[in-house]
Image (cartoon, helix red, strand yellow):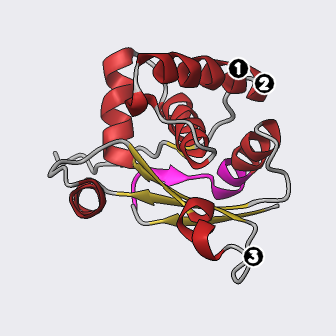
């Protein structure tokens, strides 16, 4: 199992090894222990561009998932891969959502990662109410299986110099 992480935001500082470990736990919990996963932590501008380009929605979003196996399905015999796909998470949107629901950014990032991985595994809440309920139930199961959220975000305070 391999997890590739690209962090495109400067703040907050992300504990990369902890996030990779959580991603490995998620892959194991969904039965994808042999799979590879790419994670990108992006800003709103990049996320909005992706959302506009791939989903024709001109706004930022919290998480996007790009399944690799689904894209390769017609050519799977020629291009065998262990790559499950890519999950892109908007850090600013995740922060806003965390504040809105009153939880830590660490918890929100893990929930978005789980949500994205489930999309890579074929779950899609936009297919209808029944599928949305099924996906939400699986998300809760996975979050319980992972356990308490490890500290993923390092909150640094900026020291300001006092002037007399």
**Nearest to N terminus: mark 3 or mark 2:** 3
Neighbour tally class for label 3: few under 14, some 14-19, many 20 plus, Cα within 10 Å: few
Residue, disc 3? 80
Q: Is residue 134 left or right of residue 76?
A: left
Q: Is residue 33 left or right of residue 59?
A: right
Mark whose residue sits in front, 1 or 3: 3
Q: Secondary structure at mark 1?
A: helix
- In magenta, the rendered stretch is 10-20
Residue 4, percent across and down? Answer: 65, 67
The disc placed on residue 141 is 1
Residue 164, percent across and down? Answer: 16, 45
At 32% across and 57% down in the image, what residue appears?
A: 43
Q: Between residue 154 and residue 62, name the one nearer to us.
A: 62
Neighbour tally class for label 1: few under 14, some 14-19, many 20 plus, Cα within 10 Å: few
Q: Between residue 120 and residue 149, name the one nearer to us.
A: 120
Q: Is residue 31 left or right of residue 19?
A: right
- Asked if the residues shown at circle 1 and circle 3 are in contact, with their CB atoms under 8 angstroms apart, the answer is no
**Residue 54 is inside the magenta segment:** no
Residue 50, percent across and down? Answer: 30, 61
Q: Between residue 10 and residue 131, name the one nearer to us.
A: 131
Neighbour tally class for label 2: few under 14, some 14-19, many 20 plus, Cα within 10 Å: few
Residue 56, percent across and down? Answer: 20, 55
Q: Secondary structure at mark 2?
A: helix
Q: Is residue 12 above or below residue 135?
A: below
At 38% across and 38% down in the image, what residue appears?
A: 94
Residue, disc 2? 145
């Amino acid at each position: 199992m391999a997890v590739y992480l690209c962090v495109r935001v400067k703040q907050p500082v992300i504990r990369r090894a902890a996030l990779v470990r959580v991603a490995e736990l998620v892959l194991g919990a969904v039965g994808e222990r042999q799979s590879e996963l790419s994670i990108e932590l992006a800003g709103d501008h990049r996320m909005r561009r992706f959302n506009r380009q791939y989903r024709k929605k001109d706004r930022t979003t919290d998480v996007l998932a790009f399944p690799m196996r689904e894209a390769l399905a017609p050519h799977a015999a020629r291009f065998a891969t262990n790559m499950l796909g890519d999950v892109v998470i908007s850090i600013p949107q995740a922060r806003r959502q965390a504040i809105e629901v009153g939880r830590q950014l660490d918890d929100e990032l893990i929930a978005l990662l789980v949500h994205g991985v489930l999309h890579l595994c074929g779950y899609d809440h936009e297919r209808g109410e029944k599928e949305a309920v099924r996906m939400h139930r699986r998300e809760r199961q996975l979050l319980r299986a992972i356990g308490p959220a490890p500290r993923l975000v390092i909150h640094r305070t900026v020291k300001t110099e006092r002037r007399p």
